[in-house]
Amino acid sequence: MTVGLGLLFLCCGSAPLSASLNISVSHYQLKNGLQVILSEDFTLPLISVAVTYKAGSLHDPPGKSGLAYLIENLMFLGSDNVGQMQHIGYVTRTGGTLNAATMADRTIFYQTVPSNQLALVLWLESDRMKSLQVSPAKVEAAKNELLSELRRRHQETPYLEAFFRFDRMLFPAPAAHRPIIGLEEDIKSITYEDAQNFHRQRYGPQNALLCVTGSFNTLQLRDLVNRYFESIPRSHDTLPPPVLPEPDKTSGMETSRAASIPAPSVLVGFRIHSARAVDMHVLTLIDYILCRGKTSRLVQRTIKRDRLASQITGSLERRGDLAAYRIFAVNNSEYSARLCVGSIYSELARMRTNFISEEELNRAKNRWKKDLLNRLSSRADKALFLSELALNYGDPRAGSLDIGRFQEVTPLMIAGLLNRYFYKENSQVLYILK
C-alpha cells in the first residue's frame, strides 16, 4: 500500500505560511519477516538504502558491553561474495557515500549512490545479511579496533568517564547504562562464540528493516528486493528485548574529579519513568524550550543573565521504554557550577508554576519543524527518518500523526510533565571538577 504523507509546516514570521511536503511511502513485509519501506523522490538521480537491525547496546549480554558495536565493525569484514572492506570500496567507486551507527536499541547501515547502482547496493546488503563471515581472527581484529577507539575517545573527550558514570546514575539497570562502545574489560572478554551467537540471534531478516528512498521504479525495485532478500532464511534464535525495571523517583548527587578536564562542569538529569509516545512529543518541545537556541530558557538564565555557564546543552535520551532528560553545563569554577544547579532548579520551578505563553511554545514548535525539514533534505536522512517512524510506531506512514501530536501540545501539557518529572527530588546531579 502506498500513501502520501501530508506534512504541514508553519514558517517563522508575523503571518505564518503553510507549505505541504508530500512523501510517498510504501510499506510491506516479506515472507521471512523483513520489513520493507520504499519512498520515491525523483528530484535527483540518487538513491539511499538503509538497513536497520533491532540490535544495540541494550541487547549486549551482561559483561559483554560493546558487542553490538563490534558486530557493526564485523559487518564490513566480509561475507560469502564480498571480501574484507570491499563493501566500502564498491560504494565509494560509484561516487557514493556510506556510514553506520550503533545505538541503544538498533544498528543502522546506510549508503547513497547514483540510482543506476541500486542493484549493487541491494546485493551488498543482502550478502552480508545472509552470509557474514565471522572468524576468530576477525573478532580479534574488531576487538583491537574497538579498544583503540575507546582509548582515543578518552584522550579526545576528557569528560567521557564522567558521562559513563552519569549514565549509571540516570539508568541504574545494567542493560540501560552500558556504553555503546563498551568497557575495556568487557571488550577484552568477548569471544568468537559470543560474536557468532549474538549475530545469529539478532541479525536475521525478521529482526531487520530495509528502507530505500530516491529515484527508482517501484515495480522494478520490488522485484530486486524479492530477488536478493526473500530467500534469506529467518533466524530461529531471536531473543526478546530486555525488560528494564523502572528506577525509583529519588535524587542523587555525586562528584567526579579529573585533572584533564578543560573546565569545571555539571550534569543534571531527570528520570522519566514511562517513555509513552504522547509524552515524548511534549518532552521534545520541553527540550527546545529549555536548551535549543540563543533564546531558550536555560541559555538566557545561566549564560546571559546569571553568567554562571559558558555553555549549556540538553538532550532527551531513551533506553527502551525508559527515558531521561540530561543537562550539561560548562562553568568557570566549582562555585559557579554549584550556583548553576540552583539556577536550573529555579527556572524549572518558574515554568512549573507559570504556564509558558503560546508565543513561546509556537517558537519551539517552529524550531522543531525547521529541524525536521533539514532532516528530510537528503535521501539518507529521509531513509533514517522513515525507519525511525517504523521502529517507534510500527508504521513509517505515521509521519502525519507524528506532526499532529506536536501541533496539539499545549502549555498545560508542558506544565504537566514539568511537574511530573522536572523537580529537585527526581534529579541526579554529577559535579565534574578538577
Image: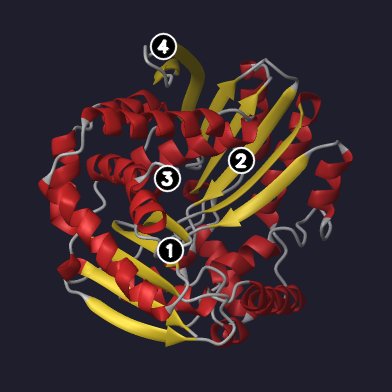
* Amino acid identity at mark 2: Ala
- Disc 1 element: loop
Mark 4 or 2, nearer chain start? 4
22 over 369 or under it: above or below: above
Q: CA distance from mark 2 to mark 1?
A: 40 Å
| Residue shown at the point (47%, 72%) measured from the top left | 332
Assess whether mark 4 and mark 1 are in contact (beta carbons under 8 angstroms). no
- Circle 3 — which element? loop
Name the residue rendered at 77%, 56% in the picture: 80
Nearest to viewer (mark 4 / mark 2): 4
The crowd level at tag 4 (other Cα within 10 Å; few <14, some 14-19, many 20+) is few
Front position in the image: 290 or 399: 290
Going by the numbered disc 3, the residue's amino acid type is Arg
Q: CA distance from mark 1 to mark 4?
A: 37 Å
Q: Which mark is residue 211?
A: none
Q: Which residue is mark 2?
A: 50
The one of 264 and 397 positioned closer to us in this rendering: 264
Q: Position of residue 94 (x, y in %)?
A: 86, 36
Which is more N-terminal, label 2 or label 3? 2
* In this rendering, position of residue 185 left or right of residue 345: right
Q: For this view, does 408 lie left or right of residue 217?
A: left
In the rendered image, which residue does mark 4 sit on?
17
Circle 1 or circle 3, nearest the eye: 1
Judging by the rendered image, the residue that carries numbered circle 1 is: 309
Residue 310 in view (yes/no): yes
Mark number displayed over residue 292: 3
N-term-proximal mark, 4 vs 3: 4
Left or right, 258 with respect to 396, comes to: right
> Circle 3: is it few (<14), some (14-19), or many (20+) Cα within 10 Å?
many
In three-dimensional space, the C-alpha distance between marks 4 and 3, rounded to whole angstroms, equals 23 Å
